[in-house]
């Protein structure tokens, strides 16, 4: 482990200086309810044994009748890039340009570097030391531009990007959590009232870190109402958001990778959640076929629930106590891949942006029904990467697992039980899964 307290104070000092400089120009952004530092549940499933039957799922994606999303007249790509690129961007050397096509697979871990730079530095080193080359991080729009439109706080993002670049870690940045001034059902995570506001934010963010952030995930689990401003999930509206975001990102950094939001694997059909396979097929209907102009890589979530990673989804669907639906296993990704192929997107890759198993022992937890031991979790993670390499190549790209533990989580947080480490500082407390993944051939 190369982390030292000197390193810690170096980054902490940088962060404090940057924060003071930013504070001279604009008021500091105060974290609000729903900040990305408060992670959301990785899945939307509840215990299938106690869930009331839901309305039958449609077998064909319906015609989308969403009301048009309000947008202002969009500037040209040249206008957007010239008018909104930050003028105070740090002078840095961009990283070498990497292709949109990834190795099959590539290895990533999700970490939480936002509030504590000393822990962030250590965790990026922990990811690197395990032989993993990607980190997934959350950049909350409200935590960057929360004080008002055009008022940016780059203090934390500058530090995070610097640390990742120094460790040779590629970043995939999740983009969501709109500020209060943008509407969208705030404080819930929801699409802004005006998509041009999101596009303007992306132009500033991506332009500032051009050549230094490899990939951007546009929103998270929009097939859940709680991630869509409390509204009924609407694939047509999400596709319009994706189109606007793709255009803004590519104008600011043509080499950046745009990844669609990972969908929550759920068989629920209600106003609160829509099945991920139905939602994805509805996206393709709204796009009119292949995804060119919308995303470069399809995002997916693949928690294993109660099953080992090799288990056939058809087998899971036949056993009610194991979920009783094809969605409740790691190989659900294969169903989403089949939809891509059906609509002519077979040349594009899939990025698994969240996957893992929980060890949650709490009897009143909605995740307890599919808990496994820490030792089983370790075994399943290694087997999942092996299975993907043997059966999903060449279409599988990044596989980013959950999580390196946030140091502030406790056993009362459900995320704690999905993690591959225990909270702590300055020591890193590895669970069996981290050690097994570090030893795993890459």
Image (spheres, rainbow, N blue to C red):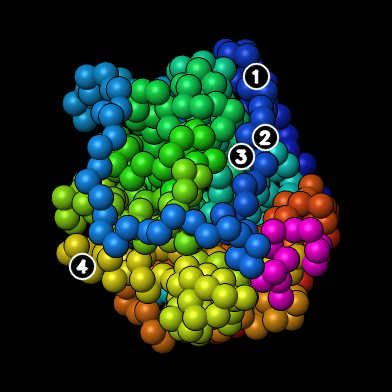
The mark nearer the N terminus, 3 or 4, is: 3
Relative vertical location of residue 440 with respect to residue 183 in this rendering, above or below: below
Q: Residue at x 46, y 27 (%)?
A: 184
The spot of residue 100 in percent (x, y) is 31, 59
Callouts 3 and 2 close, C-beta under 8 Å: no
Relative vertical location of residue 375 with respect to residue 287 in this rendering, above or below: below
Task: Give the residues in magenta.
Answer: 361-372
The spot of residue 235 in percent (x, y) is 33, 45
Q: Return the mark for residue 342.
A: 4
Q: Toward the viewer: 44 or 35?
A: 44
Q: Residue at x 32, y 58 (%)?
A: 58
Say whether residue 439 is visible: no
The mark nearer the N terminus, 1 or 4, is: 1
Mark 1 surroundings within 10 Å by alpha-carbon count, few (fewer than 14), some (14 through 19), many (20 or more) = some
211 lies left or right of 286: right
Mark 2 surroundings within 10 Å by alpha-carbon count, few (fewer than 14), some (14 through 19), many (20 or more) = some
Query: What is the secondary structure assignment of the residue under circle 4?
Result: helix
Q: Toward the viewer: 280 or 33?
A: 280
């Amino acid at each position: 482990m190369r982390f030292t307290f000197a390193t810690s104070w170096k980054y902490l000092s940088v962060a404090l200086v940057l924060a003071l400089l930013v504070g001279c120009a604009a008021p500091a952004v105060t974290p609000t309810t729903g900040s990305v530092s408060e992670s959301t549940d990785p899945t939307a499933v509840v215990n299938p044994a106690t869930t009331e039957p839901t309305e039958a799922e449609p077998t064909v994606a319906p015609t989308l009748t969403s009301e048009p999303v309000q947008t202002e007249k969009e500037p040209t790509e040249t206008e957007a890039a010239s008018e909104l690129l930050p003028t105070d961007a740090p002078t840095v050397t961009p990283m070498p340009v990497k292709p949109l096509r990834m190795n099959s697979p590539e290895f990533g871990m999700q970490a939480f570097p936002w509030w504590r730079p000393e822990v962030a530095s250590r965790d990026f080193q922990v990811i690197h030391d395990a032989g993993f080359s990607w980190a997934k991080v959350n950049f909350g729009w409200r935590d960057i531009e929360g004080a008002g439109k055009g008022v940016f706080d780059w203090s934390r993002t500058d530090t995070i990007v610097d640390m990742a670049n120094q460790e040779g870690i590629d970043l995939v940045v999740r983009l969501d959590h709109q500020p209060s001034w943008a509407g969208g059902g705030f404080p819930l995570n929801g699409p802004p009232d005006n998509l041009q506001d999101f596009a303007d934010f992306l132009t500033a963010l991506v332009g500032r870190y051009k050549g230094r952030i490899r990939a951007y995930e546009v929103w998270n689990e929009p097939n859940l109402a709680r991630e869509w401003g409390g509204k009924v999930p609407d694939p047509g509206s999400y596709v319009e958001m994706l189109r606007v975001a793709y255009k803004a990102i590519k104008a600011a950094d043509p080499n950046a990778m745009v990844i669609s939001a990972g969908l929550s694997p759920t068989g629920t059909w209600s106003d609160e959640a829509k099945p991920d396979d139905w939602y994805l097929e509805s996206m393709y209907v709204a796009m009119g076929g292949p995804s060119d102009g919308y995303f470069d890589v399809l995002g997916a979530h693949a928690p294993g629930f109660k099953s080992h990673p090799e288990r056939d989804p058809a087998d899971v669907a036949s056993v009610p106590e194991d979920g009783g639906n094809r969605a409740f296993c790691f190989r659900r990704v294969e169903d989403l891949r089949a939809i891509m192929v059906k609509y002519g997107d077979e040349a594009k890759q899939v990025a698994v942006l969240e996957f893992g198993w929980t060890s949650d022992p709490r009897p009143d937890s909605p995740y307890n029904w599919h808990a496994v031991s820490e030792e089983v979790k370790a075994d399943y993670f290694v087997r999942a990467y092996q299975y993907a390499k043997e059966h999903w190549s060449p279409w599988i790209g990044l596989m980013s697992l959950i999580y390196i533990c946030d140091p502030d989580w406790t056993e009362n947080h459900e995320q704690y039980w999905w993690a591959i480490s225990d909270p702590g500082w300055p020591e890193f407390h590895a669970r069996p899964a981290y050690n097994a993944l570090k030893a795993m051939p890459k």
